[in-house]
Image: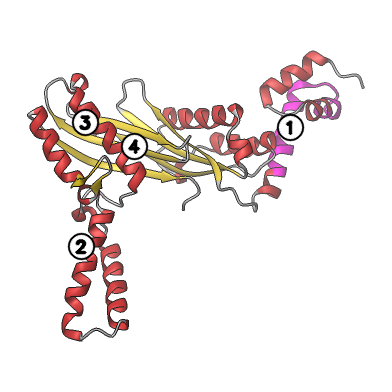
Amino acid sequence: MAVDAQDVRLLREKTGAGIMDCKKALIESNGNFDRAVKYLREKGLAEAKKRSGREAREGKIEVAYSPGRDEVLMVEVNCETDFVSRTDKYNSFVREVAETLLKKGTDSIASVPEEVQTRVKEAGAIFGENIILRKLARFRKTDQQRSILGSYIHLDGRVGVIVEFIADVEKPSQNKDLGDFMKNITLQIASMGPVSVSREDLPRDLLEEQREIFMKQARESGKPEKILEKIVSGRMEKFFSESCLLEQKYVKDTSITVGKYLNDVESMINGKVQVKRFARFKLGEE
């Protein structure tokens, strides 16, 4: 049967499918537009199952804010190749996913709405690759008066950070020193990959596991039993200095720690600032 070029164009705009696929869909559905849309979606979901076993470690990390900046959401959507991840079409798709999840109030991968899951599967047919919604983090202000949400996207979407700060200072949005501090902290987290804000925030099971590893290494080194605990304590302190944000060396001035930088900023702005929490995604990491 003859296929109307206008229908092909409209079908392509609605589904994102290729020209030849749209033509075939209209032929298979005898020109019925709605049935053609359904055909393409079913075809896309079927092909997505075939692609699902293929590794997807490229992609993009995106951040979206609510209109009043009371909430921020960060998402990682993976594809198979950097060729696809660099396209404007893929970037628009990831931005759409982030904004939709934000509007839907989604808090975790486990609670992603079915319509978004379907949209991700359908994207596999559009891009011809395995597409995975891998990670999601969402922060809501814990203190409407003092909370400030910040974010940073590094290396064209390969690393992303969202942070909640608590600031006891007048007119925080107009305070340049505070603004510079928050920007620098998001950059620090992106660059140095801390595990927690402070050592008190580290999970107990992680600490126990790390101490066991250091003790085993110390024993295998053949050192006397009486100094093993001292060796382990020293290694744990080094672990804290690398894993805890406030104990890390500040990337813009390695002569001081982030904690010292924080104290200096508090003196400058004559107020208290807290890095309450953060989430950091690195592309392809579990």
Measure the alpha-carbon separation of dots 2 and 3: 31 Å
* Residue named by callout 1: 40
The disc placed on residue 162 is 4
Q: Where is residue 23 in the image (x, y as percent from the top left)?
A: 82, 25
Q: What stretch is highlighted in magenta?
A: 24-47
Question: In this picture, is 194 found above or below 218?
Answer: above
Question: SS class of the residue under badge 4?
Answer: strand
Question: SS class of the residue under badge 2?
Answer: helix
Q: Please rate how many residues cluster around mark 1, counting C-alpha atoms within 10 Å: few if below 14, some from 14 to 19, many from 20.
A: many
* Residue named by callout 2: 237
What amino acid is at disc 2? Glu
* CB within 8 Å, label 1 to label 3: no
What amino acid is at disc 1? Leu
Q: Please rate how many residues cluster around mark 3, counting C-alpha atoms within 10 Å: few if below 14, some from 14 to 19, many from 20.
A: many
Between tags 1 and 2, which lies in front?
2
Residue 176: which quarter of the image? top left
What amino acid is at disc 3? Ser
In the image shown, does 265 or 41 lie closer to the viewer?
Answer: 265
Question: SS class of the residue under badge 1?
Answer: helix
Q: Is residue 46 within the magenta segment?
A: yes
* CB within 8 Å, label 2 to label 3: no
Q: Mostly what secondary structure, the magenta segment?
A: helix
For marks 1 and 2, the one nearer the N-term is: 1
Between tags 3 and 4, which lies in front?
4
For marks 2 and 3, the one nearer the N-term is: 3
Q: How is the image coloured?
A: secondary structure
Residue at x 61% of width, y 52% of height: 55
What amino acid is at disc 4? Ile
Q: Is residue 184 within the magenta segment?
A: no
